[in-house]
Image (cartoon, helix red, strand yellow):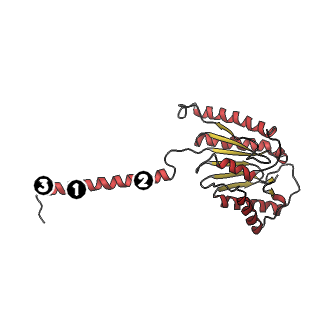
Amino acid sequence: MYRSRKQQQARRRRMLIGIGVSAAAVATILLVVALASGGGGRKSAGCAILDVSVSTQKARASYVEKFSEFATSIGNEGSGRICVILAAADPQLEAIPVDASVAPEPGAADTPDAPIQIEENVEEMSLRVAGFLEHPPVNQRGSGLVAAANVAARKLQPGDRIIYLSDGFEWSKTVGHLMEMDLSPEGIAVLLSRIDRLGLLPDLNGIEVEFPLMLYHPGGLSRDMAQENRVVAFWEAWAEATGAKLTYETLSG
């Protein structure tokens, strides 16, 4: 069908407007998706849970090393915000979390000085962590690992990270001693139900929980390998119940 020049120009304008609207809609959708997936620019923070029970004394040099690696990662790839929580008899009542930052000074984030400042800040914070491990500022000893996660959860958001510097052997009045408990699948289900009733199952959806030294106990102890495997199974079930993404490495020592 024949169209006049004016009709052709008007049709071309309508097509271009339609293309522009479609492109804007696509751009809007991409922006929404990016924001929903964390593309809005928020950088991760982290909490380190230190097991200060007497039985971990020989592992503490390794704990400081792993903390330094964790803090460096938060400094370089995250926001630099760090909290430190002592897992003793009752982390919810005893030690106040220590908040710090290993980030470079404001305005120095994109300068050549940034890595140097992060390294210096991490070294300073690692020395503080070594001091906490050597002389824990708490009255009663224990390994309140489950309760410590509740303290961390109040300070973190999805996308943040928790590192447990511990062998994973919970020993507390509220939970019990994992190495002596029924950790069959049925036993774990009963234990988690009790922990939930006590209000000790936080919402950790979107939070990564790292256990780089699970089962690590240099110097040895009366080991029950089957029970140790069940301790690992407990933490896997705990992570599923809280919504956390659990990563761990089991080490013999």
Q: What residue type is labelled 3?
A: Lys
Q: What element carries label 3?
A: helix
Q: Residue 123 occupies which quadrant of the picture? A: top right
Q: Determine whether, in the image, residue 51 is placed left or right of residue 23.
A: right
Q: In this view, does 184 lie above or below 91?
A: below
Residue of label 1 = 14
Question: Tag on residue 6?
Answer: 3
Tell which of 149 and 65 is nearer to you: 149
Direction right: furthest residue: 222
> In x, y percent, where is residue 117?
62, 32
Query: What amino acid is found at the position of numbered circle 2 in the picture?
Result: Leu
Q: In the drawing, what numbered circle is on residue 30?
A: 2
Q: Earlier in the sequence, mark 2 or mark 3?
A: 3
Q: Kindly identify the residue that appears in the image at 66 percent across and 32 percent down.
A: 120
Q: Residue at x 75, y 51 (%)?
A: 145
Image location (x, y in percent) of residue 102: 63, 36
Q: What element carries label 1?
A: helix
Taking the image as shown, residue 113 lies to the left or right of residue 40, namely right
Q: Which of marks 2 and 1 is nearer the N terminus?
A: 1
Residue drawn at point x = 82 percent, y = 46 percent = 53
Q: Earlier in the sequence, mark 3 or mark 1?
A: 3
Spot the residue most to the bottom.
186
Residue 36 location (% of width, % of height)? 49, 53
Three-letter code, disc 1: Arg
Density class for disc 2 (Cα within 10 Å; few <14, some 14-19, many ≥20) is: few
Q: Which of 37 and 114 is in front in this view?
A: 37
Q: Distance between the residues labelled 3 and 1?
A: 12 Å
Q: Residue at x 61, y 56 (%)?
A: 205
Relative to residue 219, is residue 161 drawn left or right? left
Tell me residue 47's x, y (percent). Answer: 67, 45
